[in-house]
Image (cartoon, rainbow, N blue to C red):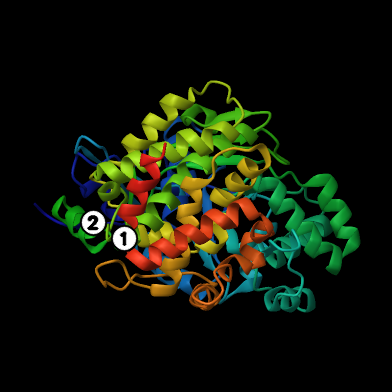
Amino acid sequence: MTNVPLNQQTLSSLPDAIALPNYDRAQLKAGIVHIGVGGFHRSHEAFYTDQLLNQSQTLDWGICGIGLREADRQIATALAQQDYLYTLIEKHSNGEVKHRVIGAIIDFILAIDDAPAAIDKMAHEDTKIVSLTITEGGYYFNLASNEFDLSHPDVQHDLNNPNAPKMVFGFLTAALRKRRSAGLPAFTIQSCDNIQHNGDMTKKMLLAFVQQQDADLADWIEQEVKFPNAMVDRITPVTTREDIDELSNAGVTDAWPVVCESFHQWVIEDEFSNGRPAWEHTGAHFVSDVTPYETMKIRLLNAGHSVLGLLGSIHGHQTIDGCVADPLFASYLRRFMDIEATPVLDPVEGIDLEDYKDTLIQRFSNPNVKDHLSRICLESSSKLPKFLISTINENLANGGSIRYATLVIAAWCYYSDKGTDQTGQVLDIIDEMKEELHQAATNSKTDPLAFLKLHDVFGDLVKESSFTAEYKEMLETLYQTSNIATQMQSLMAEH
């Protein structure tokens, strides 16, 4: 089979089995500017938008990507050499693999090289939506104070350098200032991150920043800018060399394709400042209140990932599907979801929670989506307070079970201290707080509650005696045995 390098000129030469954009990309306007073009954006929002462009005659909803970090240089280079095209590799649990070239992204600006260009693009009259996948840490949210972290060096830099910002809120502020001065309507700011009330969080953090820099502008933003909350879902593991090679064997040379499962979900509150794409025609669901949907997803899917990620990493499993193929881990996960997560969830219109949990187990078990536990566990210090610790706190308040989640917290301490699994293999731990977590976990040998005293992560959980009693017992046993499977079995035998 002839191998074809992916770009605009070669589209007609690609194998027939690969789905292609059927719209004129040269005529697209960048109605969406997206900050943080990673795998998830390309498997989710860009996918939905590409589907819409294929279905309709509208040409107003192309996407311009923006990278704020040096780490974005690689994706900027890969996309530019392919005319911003890439291949979506959709892997089904039955072994079927579908390939689709996504054409919705039409430009990319590396803001660390040209901040004015990024600001001007957001301020352009064609831009109707600025969307974000910046991960939890990019919101500069201080868990201890429950407020925006005004003391952070990046924040201080942007407050003092309004035309040369570093962080997302500095760029948004500069662009909105230009739009207001030009008499243009505000754009919508749409978070696509796994954060409860992600729109509300974005609004709160942005206004906290703008109030310090330009109070009049803050008033205008509060009145004019919409921040729709949304729930997003599609498992998108890190692309591997093997994925690239397999695509090459299928006839396409792509520097950075995206691998994902077949399942996708997007629930959005229908609150937009200046128009929106008709994403409902491609499967998105618009609602008046996304809260129950996002809580369900965060407390079951995201928390479930963390449960498997931390316990499985210590045991020596490598991937999510490997964990679920292990009956002990599959049973433990389901018991956590049934006994501790589900009781603190509100009813979700149109969703049967038992069916949803069954579907999650099926999705996690997909052997063709090798979602590595190292990816699942990265930046756990930002994830666990929302995914897992919130469930613990609610169960403490209403007398529910906490034991399954507590073992995960004890395992996280052990994981942060040892840095290896039970076989001695080094774990790939990526976390902004890695050193703080390691030091606190190491101190747990002399002070069993040292790990819990990281207030920015755990809040006041260390003051909950019913939790700390369980936690200390589990941590002591784990250090004595170094066998997480034995503890999981013992805990389940009690119920």
Inspect the image, locate mark 1, and give the three-letter code of the amino acid beneath it.
Asn
Inspect the image, locate mark 2, and give the three-letter code of the amino acid beneath it.
Asp
- Residue 262 visible within the image: no
Provide the residue designation for mark 1.
483
Mark 2 falls on what kind of element? Answer: helix
In this rendering, the answer to whether 204 lies above or below 17 is below
Provide the residue designation for mark 2.
243
Q: Is residue 388 left or right of residue 20?
A: right
Front residue of 418/482: it is: 482
Q: Is residue 469 left or right of residue 78?
A: right
In this rendering, the answer to whether 174 lies above or below 300 is below
Local packing at callout 2 (Cα closer than 10 Å; few below 14, some 14-19, many 20+) is some
Q: Position of residue 4 (x, y in %)?
A: 19, 56
Q: Which mark is residue 119?
A: none
Q: Which of pointers 2 and 1 indicates the residue nearer the eye?
A: 1
Q: Position of residue 358 (x, y in %)?
A: 37, 30
Q: Earlier in the sequence, mark 2 or mark 1?
A: 2
- Residue 438 visible within the image: yes
Local packing at callout 1 (Cα closer than 10 Å; few below 14, some 14-19, many 20+) is some
Identity of the residue drawn at 28% across and 66% down: 422
